[in-house]
Amino acid sequence: MWLTPIWLILGISKALIFTISFKRLAGHLGSVTDVLPWIPLIDTSQQAQALKICRTIRLAARYTPWDSNCFPQAVAARLLLGLYGIPYALFFGLMRDTQTLEMKAHAWVSAGRVTLTGGASSFENYVVVGMFLAPALCPT
């Protein structure tokens, strides 16, 4: 049921990434926090919903004619988790490729035990340089 809407959300996410500045987009990703990585806890029903979102985003990303890499997937996951009221953390990380010595950037989203986008080894391979939390987790 969600495959087509998520496919469209991935396209909109990709378009937003290319058309507006990160500074403007960042205001909609969540509340900015320091870079100490932590994962918000979620209950069993939220975990089940997060897993469904995860699977659908991965499936839809395979069938987009554009490159739906980690960043558009992270934006889509953030939108859907926000829609369902599931606490999340969106991370940005960097690593240096050992062969080419180039810096590589990566984005991933986690909610409880579920890493929705970016893969489970993101924390092992990348140094967290930015983190956004669900606004409900950061009272103003």
Image: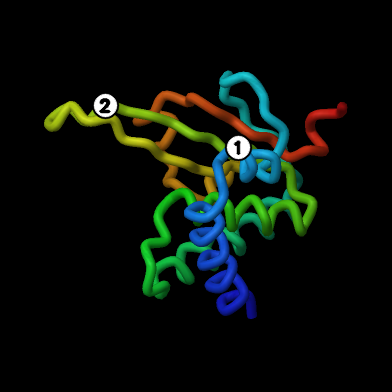
Please name the residue that numbered disc 2 is placed on.
Answer: 96
Please name the residue that numbered disc 1 is placed on.
Answer: 23
Res 34 quadrant in image: top right
Res 8 quadrant in image: bottom right
Neighbour class for label 2 at 10 Å: few (<14), some, many (≥20)? some
Neighbour class for label 1 at 10 Å: few (<14), some, many (≥20)? few
Residue 129: image x %, image y %? Answer: 49, 24
Picture layout, residue 117 above or below residue 58: above
**Relative to 77, 107 lies left or right:** left
**Relative to 20, 138 lies left or right:** right
Residue 81: image x %, image y %? Answer: 69, 53
Q: Judge by depth and name the residue closer to the eye, 44 or 84.
A: 84
What secondary structure is marked by label 1?
Answer: helix
**Relative to 83, 124 lies left or right:** left
Q: Quadrant of the C terminus?
A: top right
Q: Residue at 64% of width from left, 80% of height from top?
A: 1
Q: Are marks 2 and 1 in contact (CB under 8 Å)?
A: no
Q: Residue at 73% of width from left, 43% of height from top?
A: 87
Identify the amino acid type marked 2.
Arg
What secondary structure is marked by label 2?
Answer: strand
Picture layout, residue 24 above or below residue 7: above
Q: Residue at 38% of width from left, 68% of height from top?
A: 66
Q: Nearer the viewer, mark 2 or mark 1?
A: 1
